[in-house]
Amino acid sequence: MKIETKQKQMTDVRNTASNQAEIESALRWVKPSVRSLGAYTLRPYEPRIKLNQNESPYDVPDELKRRIAERLADRPWNRYPPFIASNFISAVSEATGWPEDGILVANGSNELIQAVLAVTVGAGATVVIPEPTFTLYRLMTEVHAGTVASVALTEDLRFNVDAIVRAARERDAAVVVLCTPNNPTGGWLAEDEILRIHDDTGALILLDQAYVEFGGFDATPLLEGRPRLVVLRTFSKAMSLAGLRAGYMLAHPALAAEVHKAKLPYNINFFTEVAAAEVLRGRALLADSVEKVRAERDRLLREMREVPGIRVYDSAANFVLFRVRSPRITHTRLFERLLDEHGILVRDVSKYAMLDGCLRVNAGTPEETGAFLDALRTIMSEAA
């Protein structure tokens, strides 16, 4: 028995060595800077109430679904979609007033973040990123061999405009990335703050406004006459199309033409093109759901501030960030009890810089928000 065990151990060692050699061979040409990065990922759960991904709790209205279904049924599915998603682009232009040649559409605004950074960032380029923020900005910068100049938010998790401008000027930054309202903190930049960052630096200013329908300043009117300003928007939040992945970019036509080179051909399938255009043209039907989400966000802010043992941060988005400050319960234990005892999934964002002990909850339906608040009160009162 001992001999067999020894032989198995030796075989396992040889297999491990062989597998490691294969792995090294497969990864030989991958940039070391990429191999050192962690992938953007999310652990799967199956909760009763899902409040962790900032989605709208409301589906697209049936009237719009019927229009979309009719359009899809008339399309040949065996053919490629249009090389240029003209219908989608036209709908964006109608909604924003921005010229079509300054509009790019993609599979969510994430794809456009990647495309913009692909054409602007290389070895030696610096990207200023106020952090904590959406981790994809840093990841994409480093994948493209750029350098991140991180600017910490203030103690109350607001943007430090002076520090952003100073870092961009001192580092001769190629790009400044601003998520406003910011994920995962909920903070936002006012019009004068955006203009100051733009006017006092020479960088390309990339504004990710995925959550702007819920609050904060919409920077779209600032685009005219400012060729270094880029605005990104998504359909995954207020437009209730997270499952289809759609987003768009507004920029100077000359810049849009260059960013277009980094997009893959046929990046928009015709399901997404049809649905996004119909939803955008019928967006008045979504206005009520957006207002409901805003109301639930405000309810979270108001009622969570009355719960002992947590600190709640202001938010203009469809979510609320809060820090667990009780000596009797950790944020990890609160997360687990919400999920295990109440079936409510929130987002643990404690690994972000400055966000130790923090969780994030997005606004749901009144019933979902009520269930979360009741569970939070119960758990925190027991820990008091």
Image: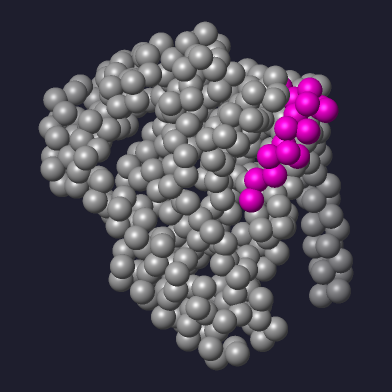
Which percent across, then down, holds residue 132?
67, 49
Measuring from the top left, give residue 314's x and y in whole percent.
54, 59
Seen in the picture, residue 334 relative to 328 is either above or below; the reply is above
The reply to whether the magenta stretch includes residue 94 is: no
Can you tell which quarter of the image residue 355 is in? bottom right
- Work out whether residue 41 can be spotted: yes
Q: Position of residue 235 (x, y in %)?
A: 37, 38
- Indicate whether 178 appears above or below 4: above
Quadrant containing the C terminus in the rendered view: bottom right
Q: Quadrant of residue 286?
A: top left
At 13% from the left and 39% from the top, the residue drawn is 66
In this picture, which residue range is highlighted in magenta?
Answer: 158-174
Q: Nearer the viewer, residue 307 or 160?
A: 160
| Residue drawn at point x = 57 percent, y = 34 percent | 192
Q: How many marks?
A: 0
Q: Residue at x 43, y 54 (%)?
A: 318
276 left or right, relative to 104: left
Q: Is residue 171 magenta?
A: yes
Q: Position of residue 170 (x, y in %)?
A: 83, 28
Q: Quadrant of the N terminus?
A: bottom right
Of residues 350 and 244, the one drawn nearer to the viewer in this rendering: 350
Residue with the most extreme front position: 192
Q: Residue at x 70, y 19 (%)?
A: 202
